[in-house]
Amino acid sequence: MTRLQERLGALRSAGRKGLVPFMTAGDPSLAATVPVMHALVEAGADVIELGVPFSDPMADGPVIQRSSERALLRGAGQRYVLDSVRQFRERDAQTPVVLMGYLNPVEIRGVAKFAADAADAGVDGVLLVDLPPEEADEYRAAFHHHALALISLASPTTPQARLERLCAHADGYLYYVTYAGVTGSDGLDLAAAGQRLEQMRSLGPAPVFAGFGIRDAASARAMAEHADGVVVGSALVSAMDGSVDVEDAAVRAAAFLRPLRSALDTLALA
């Protein structure tokens, strides 16, 4: 059983909702990435989604776009991202790390080489925003060869047939994008998203985590009533923006995440 499977199984057994913070590798500084990852775990993160900086992050709104631009200017390339995970593993051998990014950097490296290098660094899963499920077989095979989960995305516009396929064959967890738009937008319809999440959870065995529109403890709790967990990104990135040093970034990250953890812990996994 992989580290990600163990963590998701433990959450289900304990009846707890999952909390998955997203941060961009290399932002707010190159030195801050690993300390912030540890701070997030200490504040209650179950899985960490580590964004791989990319020059054209089409699914991301202004907050994460700017964080990716800043990270690239600092030199946060793919090697830096994997080295950060490797350094994180020196202290933390339990918390799953999922890389979130885009196809182009993977294709440049070669999918087999990328999968091998990611697994060697201690990565547990990969989410490629612009990889259609119909074209994912080669990637899934390469990732599975190295015990990496290929996390899939679904959205309010996903056709029913594709949704059923995604839910039935989801790897690790299924990431539900709660509205049609980019990250950090204000387009969340709680009622509609809740109905869709309940439907998805009935279609397959994998946990369904909701992302986009999670800004604070209240929105995390409201969405987690219908999901197995939540993903929070833009609001966390914003909370760290302007940090004066590494310690400040870690303190800001933990202070942001703790209220979300407390809110989720008031809910039982249905």
Image: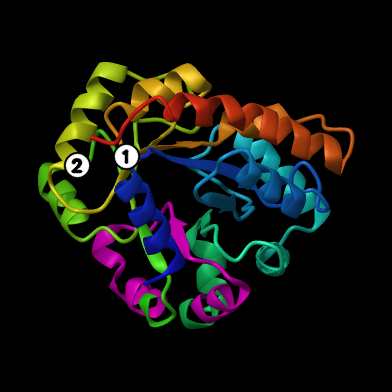
Check the image and report above or below for 1 versus 35: below
Please state the total of marks drawn on the protein image.
2
Q: Are marks 2 and 1 in contact (CB under 8 Å)?
A: yes
Under mark 2, the amino acid is Arg
Instruction: Locate the C terminus by quadrant.
Output: top left
Q: CA distance from mark 2 to mark 1?
A: 8 Å
Q: Is residue 42 above or below residue 258?
A: below
Q: Within the magenta stretch, is there residue 250? A: no
Residue that lies at the very extreme toward the right in this rendered image: 244
Residue at image point 70% right, 63% down: 91
Check disc 2 and report the residue beneath it: 201
Outermost residue on the front side: it is 14
Between residues 233 and 139, which one lies in front from this camera angle?
233
Measuring from the top left, give residue 22's x and y in whole percent: 56, 43
x, y (%) of residue 234? Answer: 58, 32
Residue at disc 2, secondary structure: helix
Amino acid carrying mark 1 in the image: Asp
The answer to whether 83 is drawn above or below residue 30 in the figure is below
Whole-percent x, y for residue 176 in the image = 33, 40
Which residue matches tag 1?
A: 228
Query: What secondary structure is marked by label 1?
Result: loop
207 left or right, relative to 56? left
Task: Give the side of residue 80 with respect to residue 103, left or right.
Answer: right
Residue 166 found in image quarter: bottom left
Q: Residue at x 55, y 36 (%)?
A: 233
Count neighbours of disc 1 (C-alpha within 10 A) and say few if under 14, some if 14 to 19, many if 20 or more.
many
Give the residues in magenta.
115-143
**Above or below: residue 1 compared with residue 40:** below
Residue 179 visible in this rendered orientation of the protein: no
- Say whether residue 132 is magenta: yes
Q: Earlier in the sequence, mark 2 or mark 1?
A: 2
